[in-house]
Every structure is written in structure tokens, then in C-alpha cells.
Image: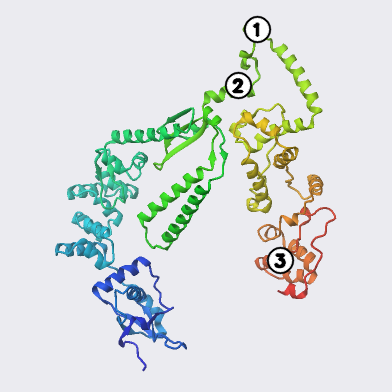
Amino acid sequence: MSHKPGDLLHIRARDLILSPRNQRTRLRKRVLEIGASLVSHGQIENLSVIPHVSRKKNAPAFEVIDGGTRLEAAMLKISAGELPESFEFLCMVADPDHAEEISVAANMHEPMHPADEFDAFKGMIDAGKSIEDVAARFGVTPLTVQRRLKLANVSPHLVQGYRDGELTLDQLMAFAISDSHKAQESLWKRLTGASPWEKTADKIRAALATPGAINAKTDRLARFVGLDVYEAAGGKVMRDLFSDGGGFVSDSGLLQRLAEEKLAAAAEDVRAEGWSWVKTVDKWTYSDEMAYSKSQPKKRDLTDEECGLLASLREREAALDKKTDALDFEDEELDAELDDVRGQIEAMEALQSEFSDRQKSKGGAVLTIDHGGQLKIVRGLIAPTERKAKKDIAGDTSSERLDKSAAPAEESERPLSERLVTQLTAHRTAALQALIAQSPRIALVSLLHALVPQVFMPPEDRYRYSAAAKVSLTNNRGLGRDASGDLESSRAWLSLDQSIGHWQAVLPGEDEDLFAWLQNLSPTKQLELLAVCVAHSINTVELSEVAAGHARAHQLAAAVGLDMADWWEPTGASYLASVPKSRRMDAVREVAGDEAAERIGTMKKDAMIGAAEEYLAGRRWLPHILRQPGAPATDGKLPTTAEAEA
């Protein structure tokens, strides 16, 4: 039986299918709301359908071009048993030739104004409906109903201004923090003609709050203490239904005291770790931290139990991430749980670093509150006075800085002259040089003792490792990063990263321990460590193809057996887009012959680059600047005609 446009039909939901020509994007939250409405109120609007053409047996007879959200909601409720299997929609048959146009036009209807929703909800509550009943019938949360009811109590003058487009919904919600219509209207009158930034929701809430009140959502002390603790201590909170867990507090003195008490309690736990000193500060800036030196913690492996806990936390994080991504709206409880899980993961990861008892006996820790209201603990700090004393002894050999306690009392009263000290220490230096020249292993240890801090220690701590061997190293790692954006993702970079990570995990945390630790390394391990240090100094970066430095680079490459084809390949980004057409053709000519080169020569630039990439892929071709002298251009095999055409 054929149906013409305009016919009205009752069609079972299970006999309908969503049309690919439907122009509406469906949100999960909206599907749930429509589903609740279908259960409570039944169908309110008809669906628009067109005949469904399919060769499949028992295929649906019609497809929906307007009403896809209602169809999806009905199927959801049928599956849940909240609607019967026989549930039908009243559908109007549309003209298939104009399906897209009809779908767009049908979705251009004007939604109900939120202010009208506020009034409607209030009317239902006044008529005896409960908040939970209203929420269930419209598929929203009770909090949503409460919030809309709260908005209905805003000054009618402001609600009308919202209807007229003079206020935004965020601004109207902000006014709801006060129940005084007079205060609301007075503030809005003062804001007339003000700049947009003066009329933000936060500014409106702050203006209507108690003078001097603190925004608990943004203030770091309030976030650190928590409103539940503040209220339990007798503090009053001015809040509204739109605060999202926030509000305004007025007792700054109580807030400060509670923050100090919480910091002090956390400090006791840190002090129990064995640090020589622990202090709490209200604020901790970068400049404050730079006044201290830091001991480096040693890495440790997690126990099996800790590994299991960390794995389960990461699984939970992934599951929550997946849930969050699937939502079309913000779920505050879900976000809070995700933040908590991530905090536990950070705490578990922190267990992988530990300080020795010796480090704790010399260092300390600072506890503070960061900008987000989170507890921040900085461990392993060496106080400026301790650092200065260590620096004076380790790095400064002037006469007034020497350890005079080592000399007899009568001699310390008459210090040696600078000239004599110079003569004596010069003899000592000469003797050490003579002995070290006869002891390659100690020379190697001395060299490493000078080089290791320059590679592995932060600049502000290197003075602590003042070695007898005055050898410096220029760290050239990362040279050329600005010119080559893919350097840090290259195989070569990652390979050296792995070597660095291996040694960082085993180096001692204390400067006094480094020399003895190096001395106890086997000669093989010493050479391995030396190689990593020296690698940082290599620099063969040049500005010209004909620079003399290339010869030295070739020498070094030959010594280590370097073949750049193992480390680099020509792509549009790495080479082909940066050279002229003739160079691209030359490269292809070397790997695929003249015919292929001439073929790509007729292409436009982007197509030519893409074709050249395909010819060069896997052929180990190198530009002359990266080839060793006398090396062939490629692996020596030309592709077959079929390969070239592929």
C-alpha cells in the first residue's frame, strides 16, 4: 500500500528506523529527558517519516527524518520495560524528495524560554506536586528543579530583563544568592552602563554577599580547609543552589586559624619521617625555593602490594575517564571522584622516590598551600646557612674560608701567608698530577667526578660537587632543537634518554658519596658512564654544506660505525618540503631512475613531495651531507616497474 505526503499513520516504534537524512545531533542527556516525558505524558508531537527502501527481509517500512531523539528515547524505555513493546507513534508521511529540507525546518522550532520553565515548575509545586515528582516527570534531577524554583524567586523585574535579553542566565543565577528583591534591583541599577567584566556572575555574587566575604570556590585557604570543617568550627557560609559546592565565608580569622592547624598537623606527619627541620609557610614562591639547595631522592621499586594498588587506581582512572567522555553534560560527583583517584595515583608515584636517613638528617621540608588550595610538600631542602658552609669548604680555597679547626690552636692564631699556602698547595698539586698520571683508573674516576655533575645535576647544585680535576664540559644536548621540531621524538634522542634514565636511577643522592661510588664501579661501568657524559659534548652542527667541520664528523662517524640511514629517513617534513624541485628529482633519480624523476617533475609541489616520499620510503637514501665519503646513495636496488607504479 502506498502512502502520499501528509498522510497520518500509527506506527509501532519497533517498525521505525532512524533516517541517515535526519539532520539532528542527539545528546544523551536530552534522550533521557525525552524518555521520561514519553513515560509520563505520552507522545506530544508527531514524527515525520518517509518510506524506507531496503532489500532486507522484515526491514522497517519507514525511516524517521524528524523525531530521532524521540524514537531513540522510546526504544530505550521499551528495552527498560517502562514502555510496552506495542508502543506506537503518530507519524506524518513526508515527501522523500525534500527529506533533508524538512528535517532542517522541523528542527528550527523555538525552544521554551527558561524563564517560562521556572514559572511552570513553580506552578506545579504550588498545585501540590513534589520536587521529586516534577523532576521524574521531566527527566531532570531534583536539584535542577530546586535551582529553577530558586530562579523563580528572583525579582520579577530582573526575570523580565532576562526575558528581554538584558541579562544572561549566569547573571540571573548569581542574583539568586540574595533573597532581597530590593538588593537585587539596586545592584542591577548600579551596574547599568558598566563594562561586561564588572557584570560577571562572580562579581554579582560577591557584591550581594556580606561585605568582606571570601569566595570559597576560588580562595585557596577556603579550598584547603573545606567548607565542612569551617562550618563545624562555627563558621557561617552564605551559599545558593548554584554555588556548585561553593559559597561565601566572612570569618577570615577563623579560616586562617583552621588552615594553620591543618598545616601543623600535616607537618607532624612529615617530621616523623626523620627530617632535621620542618616548617610551614602560608605562601611559597619560586624565589623562596631558589634560596635553598635540594638533595636528590633515590628511586626505589614499589612492593608487589603497592604495584597492585597503583594498577587498580589506574584502571579506575581509565574507567572514570571513559564515563566522563561519554557524558554530554558535566557530572560534578564524577569529576570529584576522578580528582580523588588521580590524587591517590600521584601519592603512590611519589613513593617511588625516597630519601636516605643521611639526607634527612641534613635536610628539611617545607609545607605550604598552593594556588589551588592543595597541600604542597617540598622535601630534601638544604637551608641557605648549611649550603653556604658546605660551599665555603668544598668550593672556596681562600685563606679565610679554610677549616682552621684542623690546625693547632697556637698555629691558628698566626695563619700562614697566602704566598706560602700557594707554594705548598702547588707542590701538592704537582705530586697529585704525577701520581694520577701513573694511575689511569684514578684519572678516569677523577674525570668522571668532574663530568658527572655537569650532566646529571641541576645547575644550582653543581657547586657542591667541586672536584679536584678542573675539567669542564659543554652540554650540547638539544642543540638544533629550534631548527628541527622532530628531534625529541627521534630514535637517537630517545636512545640517549634511555641511557640517561638508567644512570639517574642508580647515582647516589649525596655529593659526598659520589667519589667513593665512582671508585667502586668496575672499569667497564666507569667507561660506560664516561661515554654517556662525553656524548653530551658532541657537536657536529654546521651552517654550511662545505664547512670544514664535516670532515671531523665523518671521522667520528667512521669510528663508531654510524650509518645515518639507521637513524633518519627522508619525508616531506624532514627534508623534501625544504629543498627545491631539482633536489627532489635527484633523490628519486638515485633510487628509481630517470623516468620516475621526470614523472614527479610534472607534478605540483604537494603531489610531488608525496610521490617522492613513496619512492624513497624504505630505500635508505641519504642526502650527501649525511653520507659517509664513498658510501652509495641507497641500498643499491632499483624498484621494479610495478613497484614504481604502485
Disc nearer the start of the sequence (1/3): 1
Disc nearer the start of the sequence (2/3): 2
Q: Amino acid at mark 1?
A: Glu
**Residue at image x 19%, y 55%?**
153
Q: Residue furthest bottom?
A: 1
Residue on which disc 2 sits: 392
**Residue at image x 72%, y 11%?**
420
Q: Position of residue 113 (x, y in %)?
A: 26, 65
The image's colour scheme reads: rainbow
Residue on which disc 3 sits: 612
Place residue 433 in its image quadrant.
top right
Horizontal placement of 558 versus 41: left or right?
right
Mark whose residue sits in front, 1 or 3:
1
Mark whose residue sits in front, 2 or 3:
2
Mark whose residue sits in front, 2 or 1:
1
Q: Residue furthest right?
A: 630
Q: CA distance from mark 1 to mark 3?
A: 81 Å
Along the line of sight, which residue is nearer the eye, 140 or 580?
A: 140
Residue on which disc 1 sits: 411
Along the line of sight, which residue is nearer the eye, 374 or 70?
A: 374
